[in-house]
Image (cartoon, rainbow, N blue to C red):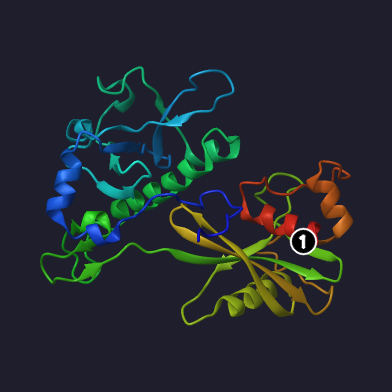
Amino acid sequence: MPLPENPNIFANNPLDRASYRRTDQAWLSEQLAAPTSLFVPFRRQPKRDWEPFVLPEAAPSQGKDIGWLPGSLMPQLAGEGIVVFLGINKRGKALFAADVSALKDAENHPALKGLGSFEDLRGLAMAGEITPTELAIMAQAKSMIDWHSRHGFCSVCGTKSEMAEAGYKRQCPSCKAEHFPRTDPVVIMLATFEDKCFLGRQKIWPKGMHSALAGFVEPGESIEEAVARELHEEAGLSVGAVTYHSTQPWPYPSSLMIGCHAIADSEDFTIDGIELSEGRWFTRAEAQAILAGKGDGTAWFPPPFAIAHQLIKAFAEGK
């Protein structure tokens, strides 16, 4: 039985990750050389994030496509750069992601010139120009390539480590320590009291934007404890029951947003002035109006691609 659809962007990855194949070097080499295999180039430039290669719209309003290329082009584009196995798609093709940042002018490389461009993944998600399933695959690819770029040396002895298991492990040739990709858990929560929900603002946010509070889960802390701690630290809210809503993979650089609702003991709050600059209770009717674009103009909420939007929407709909 398939899992229920997750409402959040970057979730619902359709690939068979085929983790049991990652230690089979012969199979991986065969897939890298197979004419049916595909890969997506990623590039990172100074002061910019990792960007996937994207093909323009084939026709107006049809949306853009991820630039999947034949695996045969990987050696000339990626060279000795990072190549990570992503999984098997529904057509049985092996998919990879490759770092081509070493190319001085990747978009004008003979293999890519005129085909497309490297674009910001967050911008593509916000614009709705790429299908949700492709965005989920890109989130996986971006997080994996970013992890390798940040963890090239052993954290135990400092020796340059080596990629192993199709990119899902790095191993130190000196002390033999093994290192694995990490996902940082982050709680993001909507506190409620009767028919109201609490949202906060940071100074750096666009004028009027209010969102759910969030923070990293600390070592030795449960999700519920992290929710209660963050709400108390940032807004002075005391909460009782904490319930789970959904999760969202967040490839910036590699977090898992854990969406929750929490019932506050009262409407009393005190903003910390550090994480938050403002806080406000919104009635269910106010939340419904703002989501429908009919608010009073003093506040607005994050767009649908953000899990905060889904938490507010669930509250507004009484779910």
Q: In this view, does 162 lie above or below 42?
A: below
Q: In this view, does 123 lie above or below 239?
A: above
Q: Residue at x 28, y 41 (%)?
A: 98
Q: Which of 189 and 32 is in front in this view?
A: 32
Q: Nearer the viewer, residue 254 or 29?
A: 29
Rendering coords of residue 59 (x, y %) = 53, 18
Q: Is residue 142 left or right of residue 284?
A: left
Density class for disc 1 (Cα within 10 Å; few <14, some 14-19, many ≥20) is: many
Q: Which residue is drawn at 26% across and 66% down?
A: 179
Kind of residue at disc 1: Phe
Q: Is residue 204 left or right of residue 238?
A: left
Q: Is residue 96 in sight in this rendering?
A: no
Rendering coords of residue 72 (x, y %) = 19, 32
Which residue is farthest front? 1
Number of numbered discs on residues: 1
> Which image quarter is the C terminus in?
bottom right
Q: Is residue 238 left or right of residue 29?
A: right
Q: Is mark 1 on a helix, strand or loop?
A: helix
Q: In this view, does 16 lie above or below 276?
A: above
Q: Which residue is drawn at 84% across and 65% down?
A: 196
Rendering coords of residue 45 (x, y %) = 36, 36
Res. 160 image quadrant: bottom left
Res. 313 image quadrant: bottom right
Which residue in the structure is indicated by mark 1?
315
Rendering coords of residue 266 (x, y %) = 83, 77
